[in-house]
Amino acid sequence: MSLDLKIKAGDFVVYPTHGVGKVEGIETQQIGEFTLDVIVIFFEADRMTLRVPVTKAEKSGLRKLSTNKVMDDAISTLRGRARSKRAMWSRRAQEYETKINSGNPVAIAEVVRDLHRANGQAEQSFSERSMYQSALERLARELAAVEAIDEDAAAKRLEDVLQAA
């Protein structure tokens, strides 16, 4: 087991490309002639179970939930000014996807902030709306887990911050 992570069954963790999951336990599996210890993580939102080899956990980006301070920084990011959207959508979409899959709440908040449309602003394309929703859900899931509230309440809180900005 990685000494830095100190993960146990019942802990919430963040896997960069899937978001918040709950550790179900650590199992030893026999794969061919190899014995492997794996961290079993269940992702409620995707109804998916992931097994991450203990030896690869840190390298894969698996981490504990963010601290309240990091989540506060992410919320502060939502209050900032949206970045200029001069680049072509395909390039921005690739950049946003990378930020979402980084698992970093502040980077995800940047995507949410940049793709948010206030009332009266131009309509978003389907892919912009889809990416915005994906980023918002990912950020809301981590906020909900950190603050022990439900995801809907977390999403509402994030959207309230965006509306007030």
Image (cartoon, rainbow, N blue to C red):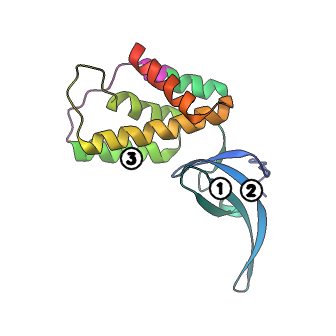
Q: Where is residue 120 in the image (x, y as percent from the top left)?
A: 23, 19
Q: What residue type is labelled 3?
A: Glu
The disc at residue 24 is 2
Secondary structure of the residue carrying numbered label 2: strand
Residue 139 in picture, x, y percent from top left = 51, 36
On the image, which quarter does residue 83 sit in? top left
Residue type, mark 2 in image = Glu
The image quadrant where one finds the C terminus is top left
x and y, in percent, of residue 82 in the image: 33, 24
- Magenta range is 76-88
Q: In this view, does 106 lie above or below 138?
A: above
Task: Provide the secondary structure element on which disc 1 rests.
Answer: strand
Q: Where is residue 98 in the image (x, y as percent from the top left)?
A: 41, 47
- Residue nearest the viewer, comparing 90 with 153: 153
Check disc 3 and report the residue beneath it: 97
Asked if residue 81 is among those painted magenta in the image, a careful observer would answer yes
Which numbered dot is residue 42? 1
How far apart, in angstroms, are the residues tagged by discs 1 and 3? 22 Å
Mark 2 or mark 1, earlier in chain? 2
Residue shown at the point (40%, 32%) measured from the top left = 112
Q: Is residue 134 visible?
A: yes
**Which of pointers 2 and 3 indicates the residue nearer the eye?**
2
Dot 2 or dot 3, earlier in sequence = 2
Q: Main secondary structure of the magenta part?
A: loop
Cβ atoms under marks 2 and 1 closer than 8 Å: yes
Residue at 43% x, 18% y: name it.
79
> What is the crowding at mark 1: few (fewer than 14 residues within 10 Å), some, or many (at least 20)?
many
- Judged left or right of residue 45, residue 115 is left
Dot 3: element: helix
Amino acid on which the number 1 mark rests in the picture = Phe
Report the quarter where the N terminus lies: bottom right
